[in-house]
Amino acid sequence: MTGDIETLEKLSTDYKESMPADLRETKSFDWYLEAVYEDPKITRNAHQRVADMFDYYGTSYDETEGRVEYHLASEDPLNDGENTFYGKVIHQSIHEFVNKVKSGARRLGPERRIKLLLGPVGSGKSHFDKQVRTYFEDYTLREDGRMYTFRWTNLCDVIKDQDPADDTVRSPMNQDPLVLLPVEQRQRVIDDLNERLDAPYTIQNEQALDPESEFYMDKLLAYYDDDLQAVLENHVEIIRLIADENKRQGLETFEPKDKKNQDETELTGDVNYSKIAIYGESDPRAFDYSGAFCNANRGIFSGEELLKLQREFLYDFLHATQEQTIKPKNNPRIDIDQVIVGRTNMPEYKDKKGDEKMEAFNDRTKRIDFPYVLSYEDESQIYNKMLNNADVPDINVEPHTLEMAGLFGVLTRIEEPDTETVDLLSKAKAYNDEIDEGDDIDVKKLREEAAAKAEIGEGMVGISPRFIGDEIAEAIMDSKHRSRGFLSPLTVFNFFEENLEHHGSIPEDNFEKYYRYLETVREEYKERAIEDVRHALAYDIDEIQRQGEKYMDHVMAYIDDDTIEDELTGREQEPDETFLRSVEEKLDIPEDRKEDFRQEVSNWVSRRAREGEAFNPQDNERLRRALERKLWEDKKHNINFSALVSANEFDDDERSSWIDALIEQGYSEDGAKEVLEFAGAEVAKAEIEE
């Protein structure tokens, strides 16, 4: 065995370097006071820290969409892109979420609201919520994201009935050490910090000490005759606070339990029964700060399937959001500082939205829609990520497989267009940015019409990426069992058709419609397969260049109202309209739009010439496609398509060259044979029908 191996020494060194240098150190309150004067951001609140976190990992601005993309979602730098998000609609949702957090950082209102992520199953809201928590953990390990809390020490020296096990007590709410200062003195410090602060927000901290810490402060101040300095120097240590979801420290994920067993103490904490015998029931030291809101303090509270909670249970969120306090049973109120995020699916949202008794709760939520992806190429990236993150067998995913799977999903999610000039497939292509300059499709108008037509928003219903991903996985394993080293769209389509009615989240009323959409996708794939085979069988770079030059010569003569020299006779003649239309009709350009197209390619050639670029039809997608199709029309009558269907006739040199050409396009050898047979059969059938 050769090459470097990991050693315990190296692993230990790497781990130590990844941890903050002061993680195990204790500091004095004096040190903390100096530290926050040097860097006031240390004492940010939760909204401010989370807002800065999004910017810390990088951003990019999409001027066309007017949207910020945050790299923690678009690039996932911590995991080399393993958990990236795809789709304009998703990044728009993330943009809106961060805007609400940043508004909360400036105290504009959203800091007192639940950020409610609403979307259908499998839309990515839980994935995004998890991503935010993961990055918050990492951010608090960094110098830019550091935060501190405190612990009480040597309590038994002063408080006579203090349990020796409680001689050192950590701040149960992990509060910022500034809360140890009385309000008046604290505000003087905060005013100084804000003069030094370089941020779009100001530092604020009006919190009271939690009841247990307040108990210790009162006892200690009484002992030292209100000498605050003596209390802080003799009984307080400052320690680094790292968010850790597993330790329920600065991060908490709250999951609804059985409705019959829901108890508010899960959120707010409960009596510590082991301490009652020592301190008594009404003593604040006998309270257990284990509620979800307590654990999430200074960080993020994440409520999973939040609206599945009983109405009475949700009332605890009213004070937690609006007043930023919690009120445990038989205990004083406790101030909290956290970003409260909730997630819910459509049925629960509709149910609670229509409940008049939930008006106060609904008023304290900021809804962020997480729809399904509406661009099928973006959707294909989701499946590609799934395959890249898995131990996929040695199998070739053939061209168009993931895109056509994505197209099927998108067709089930977008609203049927109202106009007769745009059908559902054209709309899906428009959402995929497949719009030629001559197409009369207004994407913005389509989106606005769909938003008005949809019950909540476009993309909030339809087939989940989970269903499609599951069927792709099944198709892969089936291909391996049948010793097929490739996965083709045809195989995936079969699995969609076989299992559509077996998926519990798809309403029975939609089956017929979805089967129709699947046929639409089959037809689209047929066109693409034929296009690929056309490229392989008839592709001739030199001939396309020659035909392209001829086309442009005739176009320029047409535009300039000039004549052109005949290739054979050398005589001047009018531009060959028959030839021009034979090219343009391959793009379905109607007679009344031909001048627009000719002017378009003429302008393109002129721009290229000004930039010193030679004419090459390969560089113009529409022109290249038209010329390829014309070349195909010219040659296809010399090809025996019926012979392509016979799998045992792939031995001659010509067919081998076709297979090689398809392999260059990304096909496997067996996949190339399948698409040749499939496309050959379709073309042969069309030839017979003609």
Image (cartoon, rainbow, N blue to C red):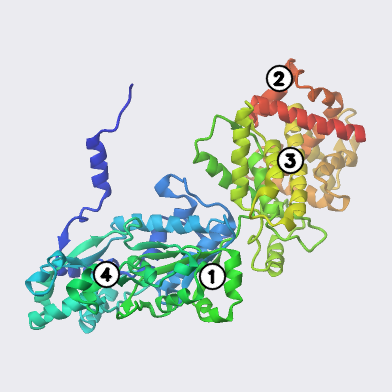
If the image is split into quadrants, where does the C terminus sit?
top right
Disc 3 to disc 2, how far (Cα)? 23 Å
Which element carries disc 1, helix, strand or loop? Answer: strand
Picture quadrant where residue 654 is located: top right
Disc 3 to disc 1, how far (Cα)? 38 Å
515 lies left or right of 266: right
Q: Which residue is mark 1?
A: 367
Circles 3 and 2 in contact, beta carbons < 8 Å: no
Mark before the other along the chain sequence, 3 or 2: 3
283 lies left or right of 290: left
- Relative to 202, residue 690 above or below: above
Q: Note whether residue 337 is visible.
A: yes
If the image is split into quadrants, where does the N terminus sit?
top left
Disc marking residue 656: 2
Q: Which residue is mark 4?
A: 272
- Which callout, 4 or 1, points to the residue nearer the camera? 4
Which element carries disc 2, helix, strand or loop? Answer: helix
Amino acid beneath label 4: Asn
Mark before the other along the chain sequence, 4 or 1: 4
Q: Which residue is mark 3?
A: 525
Which element carries disc 3, helix, strand or loop? Answer: helix
Mark before the other along the chain sequence, 3 or 4: 4
Q: What percent of the width, then of the height, locates residue 121? A: 58, 57
Disc 3 to disc 4, how far (Cα)? 64 Å
- Which callout, 2 or 1, points to the residue nearer the camera? 1
Q: Note whether residue 378 is visible.
A: no
Q: What percent of the width, then of the height, locates residue 454? A: 69, 66
- Which callout, 3 or 2, points to the residue nearer the camera? 3
Amino acid beneath label 1: Arg
Disc 2 to disc 4, how far (Cα)? 78 Å
Q: What percent of the width, then of the height, locates residue 371? A: 60, 60
